[in-house]
């Protein structure tokens, strides 16, 4: 069963809200900071927010925002039979994102600011490029399906 079917239309519709996407983006660095500082309240609240974020906001009136189109692109990408982690772009960026983020988590755990910043920075960069590719994918493929 495809992940898009498991998550459901309501999930995807709400997740296209720009408030959902733009407030979710900084959560990776915030989590690294919380772990680095050993601020367990910050870590817990960040994890809670990441879990509830996709359903916290209502479906937006329009889905023209860049971040909204990235979510629509991800949904379309998955519906087209691609995997979240695969050898081709943008899936490979997710693999690199995960490796870099775990490196950043390791740095935060060891309280090494350079490793934390490098891992977090590479992960966030990969995420933004991933989203950019999904926006392009959506813009190129969605109009052909209407």
Image (tube, helix red, strand yellow):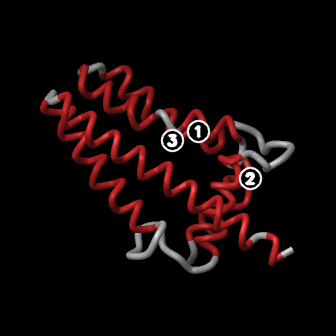
Q: Give the left or right position of residue 11, taking residue 111 as reference.
A: right
Mark 3 element type = helix
Q: Residue at x 39, y 67 (%)?
A: 92
Q: Of callouts 1 and 2, which one flags the residue occurring earlier in the amino acid sequence?
A: 2
Mark 1 to mark 2: distance in Å? 13 Å
Q: Position of residue 103 (x, y in %)?
A: 22, 46
Task: Identify residue for label 2.
Answer: 13
Mark 3 to mark 2: distance in Å? 16 Å
Task: Identify residue for label 3.
Answer: 51
User: Observer-nearest residue: 13 or 127?
Assistant: 127
Q: Position of residue 104 (x, y in %)?
A: 25, 40
Q: Position of residue 67 (x, y in %)?
A: 65, 47
Q: Which mark is residue 128?
A: none
Task: Identify residue for label 1.
Answer: 53
Callouts 1 and 2 close, C-beta under 8 Å = no
Q: Residue at x 41, y 61 (%)?
A: 93
């Amino acid at each position: 069963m495809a992940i898009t079917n498991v998550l459901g239309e309501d999930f995807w519709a709400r997740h296209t809200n720009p408030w959902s996407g733009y407030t979710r983006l900084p959560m990776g660095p915030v989590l690294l900071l919380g772990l680095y500082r050993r601020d367990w309240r910050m870590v817990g609240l960040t994890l809670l927010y990441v879990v509830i974020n996709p359903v916290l906001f209502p479906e937006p009136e329009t889905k023209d925002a860049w971040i909204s189109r990235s979510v629509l692109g991800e949904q379309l990408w998955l519906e087209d039979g691609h995997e979240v982690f695969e050898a081709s772009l943008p899936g490979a960026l997710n693999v690199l994102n995960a490796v870099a983020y775990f490196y950043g988590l390791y740095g935060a755990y060891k309280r090494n600011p350079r490793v934390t910043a490098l891992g977090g920075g590479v992960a966030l960069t990969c995420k933004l490029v991933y989203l950019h590719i999904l926006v392009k994918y959506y813009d190129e493929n969605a109009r052909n399906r209407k």
